[in-house]
Image (cartoon, helix red, strand yellow):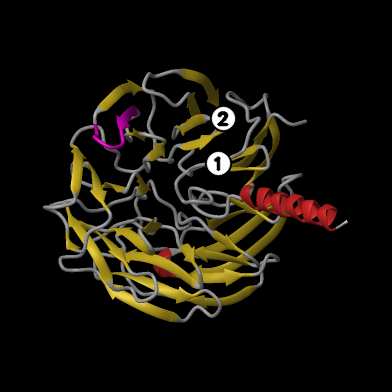
Amino acid sequence: MRRAFAVLAVVCSAAVADARAQDWPQFRGPTGQGHSTEANLPAEFSETKHVAWKTPVPGLGWSSPVVAGGRVWVTTSIGDNDVSLRALAYDVESGKAVVDTEVFRLRRGRDINPKNSHASPTPVIDGDRVYVHFGANGTAALTPDGAIVWSIKLPYESQHGAGGSPIVHKDLLILSCDGHDQAFVVALDKRTGKVKWKTNRRQPADQAYTTPLVIRVGDRDQIVSVGAFRATAYEPDTGQEIWRVGYGDGFSNVPQPVYGHGLVFIVTGFQQPAMMAVRADGTGDVTRTHVAWTLQRGAPHTPSPLLVGDELYVVTDGGIASCLDARTGAVHWQMRLGGTYSASPVLADGRIYFLGEHGGVTTIAPGKRFQRIGSSMLDGSMLASMAVSGGSLFIRTDSHLYRISNRP
């Protein structure tokens, strides 16, 4: 009898773990690195093939969808001069809108880059809270029903609008806030919204639009935050600097870093982007001592890299995809996919999906040789990265949210 109960407990625990693994609770998924464990996903799809549902999304926003608790969340902005910043949730099974909450209102919309929106940072779902971020226009915690628990505004000026998304680490909500007037990384108490620590960027500081990444190095965690001219690893509980790496005139950074093989892979931003592989076990300024390799050509301005095993995949904004040896930076292949790209690639069901800005999706098999296994097309523009959950791909265009699935 005891053995039966023990087996049942193990099965139930595995089921719970599996259910949690199906969630896509933040930008780039459960690990923040664009990986999904889902299976039985379509390699190809269209407006008439494998669309479980398609629902209109009001306004404009480039935040990526996040999925948990049977709901898909995005943010949006409605209006031009009188702008309503809203959190929206849709039922996973039906696509029906179930939450529509105005979180903040701008009496006059800030000037932003034409390619950006007032709702580009991706929400984070953590337990019974949904955290939404609109850059300097405000950050808030919501209940699953859309009630506002707390809100805060962190003043800084960004010329092109907000881009980086928040992350949750233990009891902290961590944000990179890089404006042209001031630049800092801040940790908020996720229960109350109060500032736990705030660390100013080293001077000179300038604009960036990145999402931090939590990594584990040895016996401690690090928060890696990419900023203008340098990237820095911080101690999560205090905000103290652990190490930093410089890269000359790189600024307006967008891609989130990825981590593996003891290396952090960082894209340096405008003017000419490069990619650096940095060993994460250093202290202080590691620019001269811990850079394992640098890719000078073929690095993206906007899409984040994707690490799959020993290979690193990147796609430039102009549509040139590359596969690199993650440890050495040696190029295995480069291929022009066609079109332009802003969304970050995703690994799901053993495939890599590249979402183009104008509705085209290229699916390839991971490997040292280029192998295209699918080409898809949806209506509208796609700058948001996809989410993967419950045997489905969730894709946001400039006007609609899709659930793509092999399931009936």
217 or 226, nearer to the observer:
217
Q: Are marks 1 and 2 in contact (CB under 8 Å)?
A: no
Q: Residue furthest right?
A: 1
Q: Give the percent coordinates (x, y) of residue 9.
A: 77, 56
As measured in the structure, the alpha-carbon distance from the residue carrying label 1 to the one carrying label 2 is 22 Å
What secondary structure prevails in the magenta region?
Answer: strand
404 or 5, nearer to the observer:
5
Q: Give the percent coordinates (x, y) of residue 144.
A: 68, 65
- Examine the structure image and report whether residue 346 is included in the region drawn in magenta: no
99 is higher (above) or lower (below) than 18: below
In the rendered structure, the answer to whether residue 396 lies left or right of residue 207 reads right
Where disc 2 sits, the SS reads loop
Q: Amino acid at mark 2?
A: Leu
- Examine the structure image and report whether residue 322 is included in the region drawn in magenta: yes
Q: Give the percent coordinates (x, y) of residue 97.
A: 71, 53
Who's the residue at 36% across and 22% down the image? Answer: 368
Q: Nearer the viewer, mark 1 or mark 2?
A: 1
Q: Amino acid at mark 1?
A: Ser
Where disc 1 sits, the SS reads loop
Q: Give the percent coordinates (x, y) of residue 233.
A: 29, 62
152 is higher (above) or lower (below) than 265: below
Q: Which residue is mark 2?
A: 378
Total labels: the figure holds 2
Q: Which mark is residue 36?
A: 1
State which quadrant residue 304 falls in: top left
Who's the residue at 57% across and 54% down the image? Answer: 25
Mark 1 is surrounded, within 10 Å at the Cα level, by few (under 14), some (14 to 19) or many (20 or more) other residues, namely many
